[in-house]
Amino acid sequence: MAAAFGFPLVVLLVFSLELASAFPSGAPWGQQQQQLDPHVYDRSCQQAQQIVASIVGKAHYQDPRMAASLIRLHFHDCFVKGCDASILLDSSAVVVSEKRSNPNRDSARGFEVIDEIKAALEAACPHTVSCADILALAARDSTVMTGGPGWIVPLGRRDSRDASVQGSNNDIPAPNNTLPTIITKFKLQGLDIVDLVALLGSHTIGDSRCTSFRQRLYNQTGNGLPDFTLDASYAAALRPGCPLSGGDQNLFFLDPVTPFKFDNQYYKNLLAYRGLLSSDEVLLTDSPATAELVKLYAANQDIFFQHFAQSMVKMGNISPLTGGSGEIRANCRRVNHN
């Protein structure tokens, strides 16, 4: 399949077939263990995981930023009404798209990659693989492709018929939220402090816009001063590209040391007070419990990888639609027959 797409990514993703041997069958699958099953498509669409991995591999080869974008799509989907692919819906007569929300507007991307995966799956196995499952698989494949851990993805989610801009605006943690607010938003999804600190480790890849951290450079607490928890030399390096006004959409690596490698450098950056977002650095500065996890993950990448994989499975099990709920969309951007 790699040759069919004409790009030289050899790693193409035999890993999908090998994950079962890499992870024991008794690994935790979250609260929906009995409803979701990693073998759902074993008979109905045997090539599903290979198709997803191949197209994600092509997208990653063409755009190294795409892996982080696909992980973020899954995160932003699951935090709003559960993992139901509501984030993928375009606006229509009956839907107001979550793409218009503050966390997603001008920043959420990767929708065309999901479209390509869906079209390939519809050609191979019509009306079988949900868009919500595509998001979960693409997030896993993106993590592995950039050097991170793999995990068995429980499958069988169905797609929602509606979206929630209000939920997207209110439920997704924001870059300037306080740590108690972030902890509360995670807790409402059934996720604990370990999940929080581990999942934010996905910021080891990807980037953020100037508008998301400008206040740290110039006016963190309303007194006209920069954030005292931000390393002064790092702040000085950021200011030319993120001035007091203008440059809102300018992009900066969340991890400037190894920006395209999924590793534990993010936590090492926090220990050096070089977390880009306020919501990153507060993990070290505002709670002894989260600070201990930051130090643990900075010192031991294997433990971080283990916790991240477990927390991604747990997050992927937030309120999935199963059984007769929802539908299997033929096009991830719109509800069937609409």
Image (tube, rainbow, N blue to C red):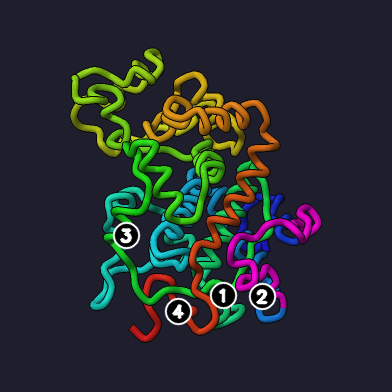
Q: What element carries label 3?
A: helix
For badge 2, the amino acid type reads Tyr
Checking the image for residue 326, the label placed there is 4
Q: For marks 3 and 1, give the one nearer the viewer.
A: 3
Q: Is residue 39 magenta?
A: yes
| Range of magenta residues | 18-42
**Residue 167, which numbered label?**
3
Mark 2 lies on residue: 41
Residue 286 occupies which quadrant of the picture? top left
Q: Do the residues labelled 3 and 2 touch (CB within 8 Å)?
A: no
- The quadrant of the image that shows the N terminus is bottom right
In this rendering, position of residue 298 left or right of residue 82: right
Q: Nearer the viewer, residue 298 or 185?
A: 185
Tell me, for residue 129, which label it has, or none: 1
Residue 284 percent location from the top left of the image? 48, 27
Task: From the top left corner, tell me how far across and down residue 178 is, in percent.
Answer: 34, 36
Question: Label 4: few (<14), some or many (≥20) within 10 Å?
Answer: some
Residue 245 point in image, percent of width and height: 18, 29
Residue 148 visible in the snapshot: yes
Instruction: Name the element at disc 4.
Output: loop
> Of tags 3 and 2, which is closer to the observer?
3
Amino acid type, label 4? Gly
